[in-house]
Amino acid sequence: MVIPMAGSGTSHLRPSEKPLLTVENLTVEFPARRRKVVSAVSNLSFDLLPGETLGLVGESGCGKSSTGKAIIQLPPPTSGTVTLGNTELTALSGKELRQQRTRLQMIFQDPISSLNPRKNVFDIVEEPLRIWNLGDAEERDRRVTECLHAVGVDVDGARERKPHEFSGGQCQRISIARAVVTEPELIICDEPVSALDVLVQAQILNLLEEMKQRFGLTLVFVAHDLAVVKNISDRVAVMYLGKICEIGPSEAIFSNPAHPYTEALLNAIPVPDPSVQVDSSDHLRGDLPSPIDPPAGCRFHTRCERATDVCSRVEPQMAPVGNGHYVACHHPLITPVEISRSVGTTVTPTD
Amino acid sequence: MTSEETPVGTLPGTGALLDVRDLSTRFDSPRGAVRAVSNVSLSLERGQTLGIVGESGSGKSVLSRTIMGLLPRSTASVTGEIIFEGEDISGFSDDQYRQFWGTEMAMIFQDPMTALNPVMKIGKQITESLRRHMGMDRTTAHDTAVELLRSVRIPEPAKRFDVYPHQLSGGMRQRVVIAVALACGPRLLLADEPTTALDVTIQAQILDLLEDQQRERYMAMILVTHDLGVVAGRAHKIAVMYAGRIVESAPTRKLFADMKMPYTEALMSAIPRLDAPPHTKLSAIRGRPPQLVNPGPGCAFAPRCPYARDLCSEERPVLRPVEDDPDHLFACHYPVDSAESIEIKDHLRAEQMVAEAAGGGDSDGW
């Protein structure tokens, strides 16, 4: 169902700044019944500079998790390219791809089911090192101890105990230790705090920031909670039904949203302040349309208050609205500016 | 363990819809009795919303299930009074409860998939209770159910009457669960984390829907959640629970304006704020809620509390009102605004500034 020309454009990419990860025209489709396809991700492009955190945010079904999984080639995308450093991952054979695996790791939403229940925690964290034959037994032991210590899990306890003996927050710490143990360059965090309480969530977010500094990581952070995404991200991409509708520096997206969908998402966040009146007229109505037969033109037009005739016919292209801030909308909340490509890409992550 | 603890909000016997007095729930376990809920008192007026807030394991779900009478009698022992419309329902038999559920009190659960019967069409799940409790015939029940589906804003309700739960999205399923709960016009609705499994946009829709229905039906609601943000704009009053006890309760605005209990403050400051710049370090208290077997003599929060002193681990603070305000109760020896706590707070802030000046290297003591 994807018309190659009607993508969301690539003007927001920053090839001159030597990105660690470049994703271009990524499409993920799954077969559905009656020879139809579910287009989970359509023609998506973004890039990530070394040390940057990119937040991918949107409702369930917008394709944010499929994007994360397509980056680590599990499963490989239907089409498009994923370039890590100088390596084009989609072009690799099975064996070559496996060689690259240590550079990419993933942290999942449910910390308990993502750990092998029959192994003790120390072995779980050590397993990637054993698979890759990294170091001898002593070095491995030292490395695992270091990582467990870094995430705040008691090492002696980890040698004896199995995941079910740890709380959800502790299990998420163990998942993080397992992810950093092979010294990866990029970690995909797929809703890592969605299953946790606010207090544990705060601990894990702080820990991720600390791990990022300590191990020099680059993160893709997938989540549906905008406040969490704002807290951790340098750059944010808002996704809707397999497309990016807006991408830009975290601060700009939140203080100055350009896409009506971003604004709707922001309005939906409960504010922990009773003096702020809840205004239900601001809340988005309806559900996400089916990704089997997505709306033509702008995919958001069926729920958008600003939609006009053009929105249902022509797909909007990425256009700059500020420094490194791009939106794909015919009627954006900020007027697009004419910035030449070189100027539009000079934004650096606010460290 | 006396009824030293005054009910939240109003005085007893002033005609509240629900009046819970000194309620405790214990479970027997091989390691000893688990005190899931201890000496909880609260009251709720008609048409009002009470938010119950706390972490996992704070006892908030057990409390709502105890009020609802859903706990198995073989393992749970309940003491205290649950007075609904002037009648103590805590001693009800299973049969009496079955008459009571749906028509007087109904509940919405967190996971809409497991709350619905997966092999029964959604319409049938609504008409079931209408026919049983309200004695409606088939056609009236059908029409009423379609109306209910419409009122919870399910598009094309007549068509959706005949679908199975798996054919609906999570938000739509939660609407069906709400329709089932509202079918027989309950006077009290207990919503246990009704939006935790949902996206923010759908969460906002569902909370709006509950608020509208509540206003239309003049129904009271208990909203159980771990997110202070969810109750801030929606509840009239809030009770914060920790380790099975209410540790602070007040009308919503008062609670947010003047938090007394360090735990409430910790819950509040752990929420990432949209108005804070990216990479703001969140204040996260260390540790987890305590085990509820053989609790020590002191304040259950003391081991995690930044302001704790010796007294806190020796003597459990009682729930007492703020000096000139009987509506605002808290259980703390050194509340957030006490001279002792301010002193510690200043000290911590100074330490943090020193650490930041030294260039990162900061670590929470987890």
Image (cartoon, coloured by chain):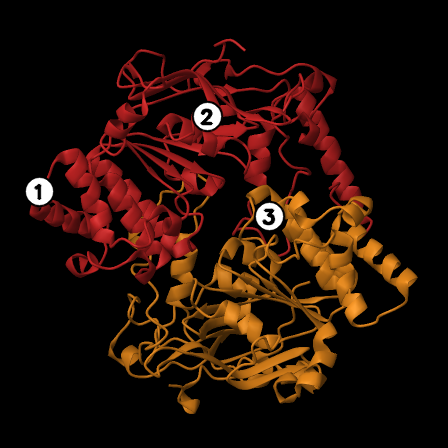
Chain colours: A orange, B red
Location of residue B188 in the rendering, given as x and y in whole percent from the top left corner? 29, 30
* Dot 2: element: loop
Q: In this rendering, does residue B270 appear at all?
A: no
Q: Left or right of B158: which side holds B315?
A: right
Kindly indicate whether the residues beneath marks 2 and 1 are on one polypeptide chain. yes
Q: Nearer the viewer, mark 2 or mark 1?
A: 2
Q: Nearer the viewer, mark 1 or mark 3?
A: 1
Q: Which residue is mark 2?
A: B74
- Cβ–Cβ under 8 Å for marks 1 and 3: no
Q: Is residue B326 above or below residue B305?
A: above
Q: How far apart, in angstroms, are the residues tagged by discs 1 and 3?
A: 50 Å
Q: Is residue A111 above or below residue A72?
A: above
Q: Quadrant of the C terminus of chain B?
A: top right
Q: Which residue is mark 3?
A: A201
Residue at image location 58% in from the left, 85% down from the top: A81
Residue at image location 60% in from the left, 27% down from the top: B292
Q: Residues within 10 Å of mark 1 (few under 14, many from 20)?
A: few
Total label count?
3
Identify the amino acid type marked 3: Gln
Q: Left or right of A142: which side holds B137?
A: left
